[in-house]
Image: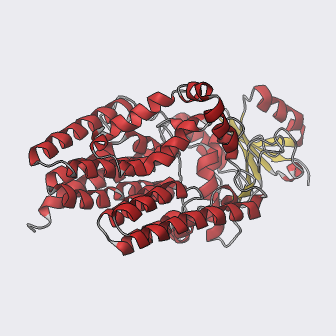
Amino acid sequence: MARILPHVPIAILVGAYAIRFSLLSVSVYDGYGTPAYDMSIPDQAIWLLSRFHAPFSTVMGRDVFGDHTSFIFGLLVPLFWVYPHTAALLVVQAMLVAAAAIPIYLYARHRVGSTVLATLLAAGYLLNPALQNGNLEQMHVECFEVLFISLALFGALERRGWVLAVATVGLVLCKEDVGLVVAPLALWVLWRRNRKWGLELLFVAAAWSVAASAIIYAFVGETNVHTGRIPFGGLTGTLRTIVSRPKQFFDYVRSGGRPWYVWQMVFSAGLVFLWAPEVAAIGIFTLTVNVVSSYPYDHQILYHYSMPLVPILTVGTVFAVGAMKTVRARRIATVAVTVCSLWACLLWGLAPFSEHTYAHWSPSSPQVHDIDIVLKALPPNAVVSAYYPYVAHIDHRTRIYMWPNPFRAEYWDTFKQEGQRLPFANQIQYLVLPTDLTGSDGQVFASIASQFKIIALAGDVAVYHKLGP
C-alpha cells in the first residue's frame, strides 16, 4: 500500500480528466452540438468497417483513408460490435487523451526525482487548454497521437527501445503527416541516445511519408487533399517568398492571430522548457506548419491541430526542469509551470473553474426533444440527406449525406464538384431539415420541395419522404 499511495494523486487527476471530458463531450453530442464533418466521418467509417463494408464516407464523398491514413481507427471496430454508439468513441477519446499523462508522469518521476513535482508537471499536461479544446472538437485521430507521442518520448528519453518502437508504429498508423514528429524525434535520438535507433526512425519517417502519399493517391487520385493550405501557391512558392520577399512572408506570419497562438501554446506549457529546449524543439515542424498554414483553424488552440504539440511541450518542460542543478530551482520552476497551467486553463480551458464553457443545448431541452422525436421516423438504412447538426446522430448507415449534398455539392470528394448537382441526387429517400431554411440552402430545398412530403414534424424540424418510387 505504501508503494501505491504516492501515485494516487495522478491517478485521481487522470480519472477526473477522463470523466470530465467524457461527460462533457457526450453531453455536447446528445445536445446536437457535434457537427457532422469531423464527427460523422470517423463514426460512419468505423461503423462501416464493423459491418464489413468499405469505409467510404458518404458524408465527405471519399474513402476515409483517402482523407487521412488513420488505420489506427481499426482498433475501435470491435467496440462497435459490443456497443455501437457514437458516444462510445467520445468516451474512448477522453480516456486516450487522459492516459497520455501516465508516461509523462513516469518520466518526470525519474527526471526530477520527486513524485510531487512529477504529479504537478503531469497535471500541467491535463490542464492545457489546447488539449481540452481539441478533446471537445468532435472525434479525431489526434487522441491516439497524443498518447503515442507521449509513449515515444518516454521510450526515447528512458532508453526503452521496445516502447519507442511500439509507439512509432502506433504513430505511423495514425496519420500521413506524423513524419513531422517522428523525423525530429529521430534526429534527437540519433544525437543523444542511439545512432542506430535514430537512423531507423528517420527511415520510418521518410518511408511512411512516401507510402502514405501513395495510399491517399490510390484512393482519391491526389497525394494529399489538404495541400491547398500551404500559402503562396505551395511549398515552392513559400520558400521563394521567404528568400525573395521576406517582408511579405513575415507580414503574413504576423497576421491572422498567429503570434497570439504561439504565445498561448508556450505560455500554457509554462515557458520553462526554454531553459533546455532540445526536447521541446521536437515539435518545431508541427508548430511551424500550424503557424504558416493558410487554414485559420491550424493556428487556433480551439481545434485538434494543436493537440500533438501538447505532450511534446510538456515532456520538454519536464526535461528542462530536470536539467536544473538544484532541488530548489526545480521546485521553483515546477511552481511556475503549475501557475501558468492553471492560469491558462482558467482563461482559455474547459475545466469546471474555467471562465468559458462549451455552449450547447442541454440534452433535456425542448429543441433536443423535438429532434429526437422526428429522427425516429427514419428507417434504419434509408438513404438520407440531413442538416449539419443532425448527421452525427443518424450516420450508422451506408448512405448519409450532409445537406445540401447531393443536390448541391459542398465539401465533397476532392472539392472539384462544388456547387454541382451530383448524379445520384434522385436516389435520396429522406430529408431531415429545419423548416425555416433560408439563403442558398432554402433555394436548394425550394427546387426539390415538390418531390417530398413531411412525414414527421416537431418544433421547427421535419423529416421529408420522397414521393413516388
Residue 7 position, x and y percent, is 18, 60
Task: Report whether residue 309 is seen.
Answer: yes
Residue nearer the viewer, 384 or 44: 44
Q: Is residue 6 left or right of residue 210?
A: left
Quarter location, residue 346: top left
**Image quarter hosting the C terminus:** bottom right
Residue displayed at 77% across by 25% down: 439
The number of numbered discs placed on residues in the rendered structure image is 0
Q: Is residue 138 left or right of residue 262?
A: right
**What residue occupies the far bottom of the structure in this picture?**
162
Residue displayed at 37% across by 69% down: 194
Q: Is residue 206 left or right of residue 56?
A: left
Residue displayed at 29% across by 45% down: 124
**Image quarter hosting the N terminus:** bottom left
Residue nearer the viewer, 76 or 111: 111
Residue 94 position, x and y percent, is 41, 53
Residue 457 position, x and y percent, is 70, 39
Residue displayed at 79% across by 58% down: 221
Quarter location, residue 185: bottom left
Residue nearer the viewer, 237 or 69: 237
Task: Report whether residue 373 is seen.
Answer: no
Q: Is residue 227 left or right of residue 264?
A: right
Which colouring convention does the figure follow?
secondary structure
Residue 184 position, x and y percent, is 46, 56
